[in-house]
Image: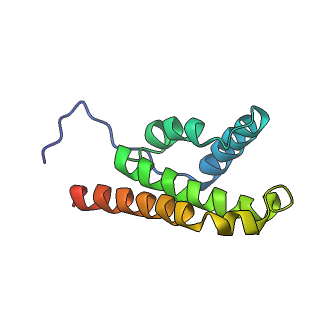
Amino acid sequence: METSANTSPAPARSAPAAFVAGALIGAYGGLIGLGGAGFGLPPLIGLFRFSALETAIFNEAMSLVDVATALPFRAATVPFAAIGDNWPIVLNLLAVILLVSAVKVWRRG
């Protein structure tokens, strides 16, 4: 692949910048009642130069972590028995997330 004289090298990914961006996005998303995932996509693509595919896969993985982390805290409102009663739905959703991620990776490579 050739590069032209007009293109500048991608900036290095910085851990402090990532921490600050993540903290701001998480705080803003939390204040308005969202997990902040939608607000995290533009910085990942623009500021940290992730590709769209990397961003989508990272977003799906973080959503899975978010849901897994929230389950114990929401157990007081939604008992685990109710989740267990709907295990086919839960497994279906997880399978679809994994399938979509696998297809994205397979199509890329």
Please identify the residue farthest to the left as the structure is shown.
Answer: 2
Total numbered badges shown on the rendered structure: 0
- Would residue 78 appear left or right of 107 to someone viewing this image? right
Q: In which quarter of the image is residue 37?
A: top right
Residue 92 against residue 8 in the figure, above or below = below
Residue appearing at x 25%, y 62% in the figure: 106
Q: Where is residue 75 in the image (x, y as percent from the top left)?
A: 81, 62
Q: In which quarter of the image is the C terminus?
A: bottom left
Specify the quadrant of the image occupied by residue 33.
top right
Q: 78 left or right of 12?
A: right
Q: Position of residue 40 (x, y in %)?
A: 57, 41
Q: Residue at x 20, y 33 (%)?
A: 5
Which residue is more in the foreground, 76 or 9? 76
Q: How is the image coloured?
A: rainbow
Viewer-side residue, 94 vs 86: 86
Residue in the picture at 44% in, 58% down: 97
Residue sitting nearer the eye, 41 or 89: 89
Position of 84 relative to 16 (above/below): below
Task: Give the x, y percent position of residue 104.
Answer: 31, 55
Furthest toward the front, the residue is 85
Going 60% across and 49% down the picture, which residue do you hit?
18
Q: Which quadrant of the view contains residue 3?
A: top left
* Residue 8 point in image, percent of width and height: 32, 37
Q: In this view, does 6 lie to the left or right of 17?
A: left
